[in-house]
Amino acid sequence: MYPVDRLITVTTRRIAVTATYSTDRALVSRILASASLRVPVHGTLPPDVPGNTPVRIAARAALPAGATDYTGKGFDACTAPSAAAMQAWLRSSPYRAVGVYIGGSDRACAQPNLTSSWVTQQQAAGWHFMPIYVGPQASFGEINSAASQAVSAAEDAVSQARLLGFGPGTPLYYDMEAYPATLNGRVLRFLTSWTRELHTLGYSSGVYSNSLSGIQALVNNYDNPADTMPDVIYDALWNGAANTSGPNPAEHRLGRAPAHPPVPGRPERHLWR
């Protein structure tokens, strides 16, 4: 066995992974994070191993609370834009918030730009964030054990958020794409468990969904004691209006005013200098 300098052990439900390394701690941390494991918190080598150096791998320094609390215009992009593009948007558009897809089994795009450094840089420049997580989807038949899947998703979302610097209290949005009404019960069980687990972990719960599926289901069950409501919603309503009005006024009972995404396919012109 080759001597090693340091060791990291990460644990999640029913699994523990130990990784050893010499000097490149960042590399092994990225490898562990790519397996959707929790943020490594502590590692020590046995005392008889040469070069034993205890090491603590913590989450990135938390961003200010205001980084995810904003009233105004924003957008989301499947892939986080480059720093140059973000600067151009800042100079020449009314937007000051951006949705970023931090993880999940159904996240569709690669994220070469989405790092803790990128988040810190954009926050310092004046941007605010909506961290979005895209896990199992009801419409694809992927939710078979709603409660346990939601708990796993929430744990992973928190791990990914912490790696980017989003600390406790941050609202993490679960992206539940449109689905048939016959799956409402399954989705509500999932979103209830998602919210409860995030609260247990110290985070706020957000839900992104279609006005006539996930959001409607939440509204209809707002007073049902079996269901736990999210703290905030992101209403996928392509109404062509830059407002927070929805087809059901009771949406506002679900927390802060819902957001509407821009209309797909409708170009916006901004002069980038």
Image (tube, rainbow, N blue to C red):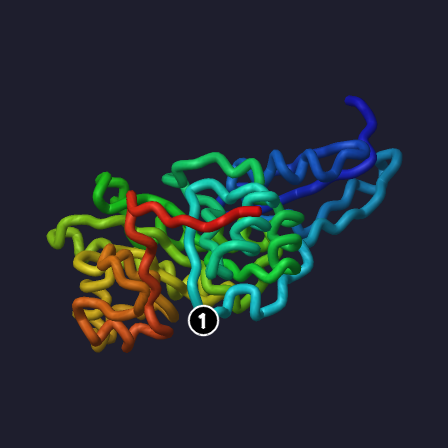
Which residue is denoted by mark 1 in the rendering? 71
Residue lying furthest top: 1
In this view, the residue in front, 38 or 127, is 127
Count of numbered labels shown in the rendering: 1
Where disc 1 sits, the SS reads loop
* 201 left or right of 189 in image: right
Is 116 placed left or right of 104 in the picture?
right
Pointer 1 local density, CA inside 10 Å: few below 14, some 14–19, many at least 20? few
Which of 250 and 243 lies nearest the eye of the viewer? 243
Percent position (x, y) of residue 39?
60, 49
Between residue 218 and residue 194, name the one nearer to us.
218
Give the percent coordinates (x, y) of residue 48.
85, 37
Q: Residue furthest right?
A: 50
In the depicted structure, whether residue 254 falls above or below residue 100: below
Left or right, 69 with respect to 165, comes to: left
Q: Residue at x 17, y 59 (%)?
A: 212
* Residue 202 seen from this side: no
Q: Residue at x 47, y 59 (%)?
A: 95
The quarter holding residue 230 reads: bottom left
Q: Is residue 51 above or below residue 173?
A: above
Q: Residue at x 68, y 59 (%)?
A: 61
Q: Residue at x 19, y 63 (%)?
A: 217
Dot 1 amino acid type: Thr
Quarter the N terminus occupies: top right
Give how far across and how far down residue 150 sits, in percent. Answer: 36, 53
